[in-house]
Amino acid sequence: MKQKDLHAMQLYPMGDAAVVVQFGDSISEATHALIQNFAAYLQQHPFRGLVEFVPAYTTVTIYYDPWLLSEQGKYNPYTKVVDVIEQTLPQVNQRKAAPNARVVEIPVCYGGTCGPDLAFVARLHKLSQQEVIQLHTSAAYKVYMLGFSPGFPYLGGMQEKLATPRKETPSPRIPAGTVGIAGNQTGIYPSETPGGWQLIGRTPLLLFDAYREAPSLLQAGDEVRFYAITKKEFEKRKELVHAA
């Protein structure tokens, strides 16, 4: 990142105990890399009063303890956090690029009861269902952020040919592991929940398990590659996962 880009960033309050750092106004690899570097720096160098930080597509929201920070002198808490962030940004600018992304391969059973909206997506784009599967499995996806529910990955890199609007009426119950499309994004529901994405398949893998050392299977910065499996393979792997 060029030094002049630091001045393009925006900092603004969110309530009385959070600051939003906006690195850009559109989803991009460059903005994602800045956010990853900034988040890694905060993880390694937490400042006094830091509660947590939440990376997103173009922003990082920093939550802080205003009472703790108000003990540190003449600055009000928000001003103190902004000063810390402004001192941190040049350090982020000098950080080396992140190492090669971890690649996670995800098996998916497409169509049928696992992906009830696959036929709709195919009709909408005048493709066969097999062509939709081929396009969906041929891309390398970047995990830009986790959100909506614990472990839900928002993935960038989907073929533009598959961009599909959300459902007009959300589904009341979507099974855990379901793979969906909404706009130009694809994602995986880690737990049973309502949702409005077009459902094209399902993975037997557990995307989120609170009892694992690392609860979320995927992390921001990971690369995801999908591959197709049969319904029989899905059921077998699902049994193995839940028996573990």
Image (cartoon, rainbow, N blue to C red):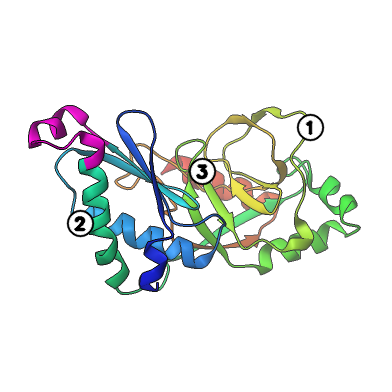
Q: Report x, y in % for residue 44.
A: 20, 56
Picture residue at 58% right of the left edge, 43% below the top:
177
Membership of 68 in magenta stretch: yes
User: Mark 2 is on which residue type?
Assistant: Gln
What element does badge 2 sit on? helix
Residue 167 quadrant? top right
The residues tagged by marks 2 and 3 sit, at their Cα atoms, a distance apart of 24 Å
Which range of residues does the magenta coloring cover?
Answer: 64-79
The residues tagged by marks 1 and 2 sit, at their Cα atoms, a distance apart of 43 Å
Check contact, mark 1 vs mark 2: CB within 8 A: no
Q: Report x, y in % for residue 117.
A: 79, 43
Nearer to us in this view, 131 or 19: 19
Residue 120 quadrant? top right
Nearer to us in this view, 225 or 152: 152
What element does badge 1 sit on? loop
Which sits earlier in the primary sequence, circle 1 or circle 2? 2
User: Mark 3 is on which residue type?
Assistant: Phe
Give the crowd class for mark 3: few <14, some 14-19, many >=20 residues within 10 Å.
Answer: many
Mark 2, residue position: 44
Given this view, does label 3 or label 1 mark the residue nearer the observer?
Answer: 1
Q: Report x, y in % for residue 198.
A: 73, 42
Given this view, does label 2 or label 3 mark the residue nearer the observer?
Answer: 2
Mark 1, residue position: 168
Give the crowd class for mark 2: few <14, some 14-19, many >=20 residues within 10 Å.
Answer: few
Q: Main secondary structure of the magenta part?
A: helix
Which sits earlier in the primary sequence, circle 2 or circle 3? 2
Membership of 214 in magenta stretch: no
Q: Would residue 15 appear left or right of 26 to someone viewing this image?
A: left
Please identify the quadrant where the C terminus is shown: top left
Q: Would residue 2 appear left or right of 115 to someone viewing this image?
A: left
Check contact, mark 2 vs mark 3: CB within 8 A: no
